[in-house]
Amino acid sequence: MGKAFGARVIAAASTDEKLAVAREHGADELINYGDGALKEKVKDLTAGRGADVIYDPVGGDLFDQAARCVNWKGRILVVGFTSGTIPKYPTNLALLKGCQLVGVFWGDFRRREPQLCRQNCTELFDLYRQERIKPLVSQVFPLEQYAEALNVFLNRQAVGKIVLGVRGA
């Protein structure tokens, strides 16, 4: 999404395979955070400023590193906790960085703001038709193999979206 709006995108992932996919989909810079040095690497790539927007679907220890490398008046988008651990946010970082912590929960957004959700979906489909975004579906499982699909997700082996196919749909 960042690339669709002209942003410089720094992708961070736990494996070189995931980083290669990020590069194929337009990431400008790549960071393997497996060594625990996410903050330092982001600061190096941004001349010490930090990231303006951080999209975090992982949570856990990685969230703490991400929160420490956000730029002044930046935003941290909390999207999920695939690590299995819900992090604790040190509120002094919001004060020191003047940043925002934003929860992004599509399910509740859809329920509470249906018109805005429809508008967003229309805009997303327009971006897709214009080929400005290209969602990555890495694996499609038949519905009967839902457990295998879930294990790919739970074991953090997913590179892109995992889809359950429903016959006749």
Image (cartoon, helix red, strand yellow):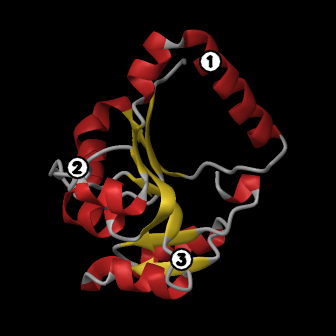
Asked if residue 65 lies left or right of residue 7, the reply is left
159 over 151 or under it: above or below: below
Identify which amino acid the numbered label 1 is placed on: Leu
Callout 1: 10 Å neighbours few (<14), some, many (20+)? Answer: few
What residue is pinned by disc 3? 20
Tell me if I can see residue 56 in this picture.
yes
Identify which amino acid the numbered label 3 is placed on: Ala
Does the CB distance between marks 3 and 1 fall below 8 Å?
no
Q: Position of residue 135 (x, y in %)?
A: 61, 48
What residue is pinned by disc 2? 151
Secondary structure beneath dot 2 equals helix
Identify which amino acid the numbered label 2 is placed on: Asn
Could you tell which of marks 1 and 2 lies nearer the N-terminus? 1
Q: Where is residue 141 in the image (x, y as percent from the top left)?
A: 40, 41
Front residue of 36/139: it is 36
Q: Where is residue 161 in the image (x, y as percent from the top left)?
A: 47, 47
Quarter holding residue 16: bottom left
Could you tell which of marks 3 and 1 lies nearer the N-terminus? 3
Secondary structure beneath dot 1 equals helix
Front residue of 149/42: it is 42
- The total number of labels drawn is 3
What residue is pinned by disc 1? 116
Callout 2: 10 Å neighbours few (<14), some, many (20+)? Answer: few
131 over 159 or under it: above or below: above
